[in-house]
Amino acid sequence: MNFKEKTVFITGGSRGIGLEVVKKLAIDGANIIIAAKTAEPHPKLPGTIFTAAKEIEELGGKCLPVVCDIRFEDNVIAAVEQGVQHFGGIDICVNNASAIVPFPTGSVDMKRYDLMQDINTRGTFLVSKTCLPYLRKSDHAHILTFSPPLDLDDKWFAPHVAYTISKMGMSLLTLGHAREFKKFSIGVNSLWPLTAIDTAAVRNVLGGEDTAKSSRDVSIMADAAYKILSKAPKSCTGNFFIDEVILRDAGQTDFEKYRISDNELIRDFFVPDDIANELAIDVSWSASEDADNDEITYGLVLQLLELDTVLVNTTDTTQAVPYSTLKVTSLGSTRRY
């Protein structure tokens, strides 16, 4: 499959995984519509829709950057209409934009709850719905959403139920739309990473440089997305792909090239135990504190506050604990964070 002249509508593609995915498609000569909020440089986040457009065009693609907040229907309708007027249609919709507030119930105010629901679940529904009339006209129509497998193990819900249900909502849309849109020959799939990925979210929210060093490069998600989008949409639909799994199924054996460092890789949120065990990813987002013999079973290390304390998100509260007592644990293994 070659993506020359295929038109891709992507949300939040000004950096990270989304940008890497469309850059790979741009090498083939794809048309890219970037619908994202970042028009001006951000002090903590790299790139804007305009710097992304420049990178895409330097690789041989064409790009229309559109300022768009997917929480608002008029923004999405306008972005899609601009893209269709510019390129003549839409072949692929990539739901990449996402909000993450991985806190327990007592630490999530309703503004942040609504933000996650509005961007993750509602935004995905709105963007897919708005692109649908144009996808129906395409001879190679795909919707690809970056959301996890539908694993209902309560360990994924207890630490940050508000975040989890917003991401699972995206996956439920994949499940429903795959069946609903099958009659239109539109492939609808989800893709999720096996390990943590070195993105702005990891560096700014989920542990900083140390966690980034236990992550993989964004290019593994781009390679996996390319494989999915290359498949015939009529036969490839309703799947919840894991990046390494789909690449292994395609014959790839070298995954060392994606490592950021030699550090042990961290298993991403929501990866089912059977997949993690099979691929020998042992360390996950969990923590335990030995000082009071009080195990924090599904805590998440969010960021270093000072040299001697870290902020830990537990099932009940967010608290600072001594750095010296904190360990990351998973599947029977323990190591210092």
Image: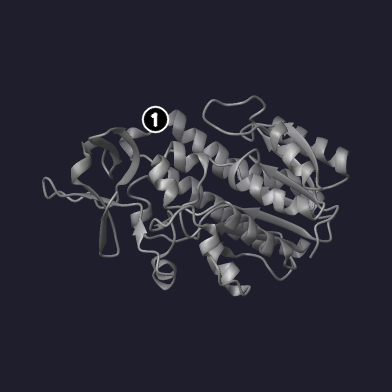
Residue 95 visible to an observer of this rendering:
no
Question: With 274 as the anchor, is 3 left or right in this view?
Answer: right
Circle 1 residue: 109
Q: Nearer the viewer, residue 286 or 138?
A: 286
Q: How many marks?
A: 1
Farthest residue, direction left? 292
Q: Quadrant of residue 232?
A: bottom right
Q: Residues within 10 Å of mark 1 (few under 14, many from 20)?
A: few
Question: With 80 as the anchor, is 280 left or right in this view?
Answer: left
Q: Quadrant of residue 49?
A: top right
Instruction: Determine the secondary structure under disc 1.
Output: loop
Q: Nearer the viewer, residue 105 or 47?
A: 47
Kindly identify the residue that appears in the image at 80 percent across and 61 percent down: 140
Question: With 30 as the anchor, is 220 left or right in this view?
Answer: left
Which amino acid, by three-letter code, is at mark 1? Asp
Kindly identify the residue that appears in the image at 77 percent across and 47 percent down: 59
Instruction: Report the quarter where the N terminus lies.
Output: bottom right
x, y (%) of residue 250? 63, 73
x, y (%) of residue 187? 70, 62
x, y (%) of residue 288? 22, 50
x, y (%) of residue 328? 28, 52
Question: With 182 as the anchor, is 170 left or right in this view?
Answer: left
Kindly identify the residue that appears in the image at 37 percent across and 60 percent down: 153
Kindly identify the residue that appears in the image at 25 percent across and 65 percent down: 332
- In the displayed structure, 303 sits above or below 146; it is above
Residue 198 visible to an observer of this rendering:
yes
- In the displayed structure, 86 sits above or below 253; it is above
